[in-house]
Image (cartoon, grey):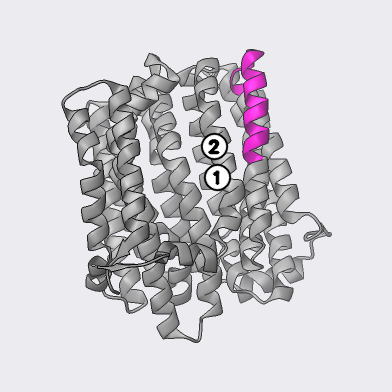
Amino acid sequence: MQIKGLSLQVSLFRRFPVLSIMSGGALAQGLQLLAYPVIARLFLPQELGSYWSAMGVITVLVAIFTLQLEGAILGARSQQVPLLMQVVFWILGAAASIILLLVVLLKVIFPPAEWSHDVWWLAWYCPIALLTHGMYAVGVTRATRFREYSRLGLAYLTIVLVAVCIQIVAGYAGLGVLGLVLGDLLARLLGVWVLLWRSFAITMPQLSRIRRVLVRFRRFPLLMGPATILNTVSQNFQSIFFPLLFGNSQAGQLGMATRLAASPAGLVTGAVSQVFSGELAARREQPTEQRRLVLDTLYLSTMVALPFGIGVAVCAEVLIPLVLGDSWRVAGEYASILSAGIAMSMIVSPISSIVIVRNSLSTAFFFALAELFMRGLPFALAAMDKITSPTSAVVCISVGNMALYALGLARMARLVEVSVSSYCRRVGWLVAVSLISFAPAAVTRIQGEEPILVIVLSGVGLLVYLVLVSVFRPEK
């Protein structure tokens, strides 16, 4: 060990503008976490479960109809970016129009008798959300391409602040799912405006130009498209199939657990990923620098993921019911079970997308097939009555996520010629320090002591971990 005034992770945060993205994102996540205790008391678990299920379907539709051309934006020349965005806009608009027509026909000709008002609100919102969510995704990619990190941070803050405020007001008004939909709609519209203000103008579609773009960038819809669709479907299995198998109430509990545990993780992952993508693209002709950047990024993400994952595993089951109320106790159990898989995703996800785009598009497809199998397996077993408990299904989901991300780490490292053993040597001491720091809190939790004591000891463990990581580190 050697004493350092500033550790590696601090230098990475100074060198890379991760904080520019996270400044708005962290505040947004803080507001969202503070709002969840209110939202959890204003909406029923089944209402939130229905809403989150619809968001899962919309996410899949966005993955299909953007044709993965947002990935092409990262590698396109500056003058090609506006044209790519125009193509995506008109494709999304056409798809939204077709879906809206199908909903109208369903309502007029074959209205399902079992559909409630909530389900119809979600059905009407689906085509609108396809356009707004799709353009928001494209706007995020464009801002990443041009390194507009402060705009990303402002967009994160805007979308969460608007959604939370409207949904709380709507919850007090008793609007139910309609209030959740209105909050999401206005938040997405403002988020798109922040990301694309003065950088995107809608023009009339020219089919010849659209055809040329699709031909030039065909490897993205042909190779990345199927892989991303499979990936998105597998990631949204739980929001789509969990309510069908175990009911909307259990789906609401799992949705709340996922958001409370995964949202902060997603903030860090997204910020590091966006900066990593920009920095790796700038080093496309420097393989040695690329390998160093990959190792540094893996070290940074592991340094953050370890205390987060252990903290959620130890505290979630006592903290979530304490904050949200006893009716959300199951959400605490689910969050604790999911913690290991979420920590693994924090390590691997930041490097995955751009490494695949730059090195092997075919890898995305084969990895997506593995995701589809591993994440679909719990629901296939549940449908065959091999898994009868929702808790057992959540355990299978978490184990599958850990296996997938371990496989992904090995493959990503190989693509950039980084050995997994070199990564393990660098982070081995982080694992030891994190386990030692949180051991008192874990023992206290196992013994069933007071929740407040568990939370306090976890906070102390986090401080010890941060001090040790900031002062000491081994040689590279």
Amino acid type at image mark 2: Gly
Quarter of the view holding residue 180: top right
Q: Is residue 91 above or below residue 157?
A: below
Residue 361 placement (x, y as % from top left)? 44, 71
CA separation in Å, label 2 and label 1: 6 Å
Q: Residues within 10 Å of mark 2 (few under 14, many from 20)?
A: some
Say which residue appears at 26% left-offset and 47% top-offset. Answer: 400
Residue range corresponding to the magenta coloring: 159-178
| Disc 2 to disc 1: CB gap under 8 Å | yes
Horizontal side of residue 28 vs 227, given as left or right: right
SS type, badge 1: helix
Query: In this rendering, is residue 215 above or below 453?
Result: below
| Magenta span main SS | helix
Mark linked to residue 26: 1
Q: Is residue 124 visible?
A: no
Q: Position of residue 76 (x, y in %)?
A: 63, 74
Name the foreground residue: 440 vs 332.
Answer: 440
Q: Looking at the figure, which quarter contains the N terminus?
A: bottom left
Where does the C terminus fall, quadrant-wise? bottom left
Residue 59 higher or lower than 111, as above or below:
below
The circle on residue 30 is 2
Judge left or right: residue 62 versus residue 404: right
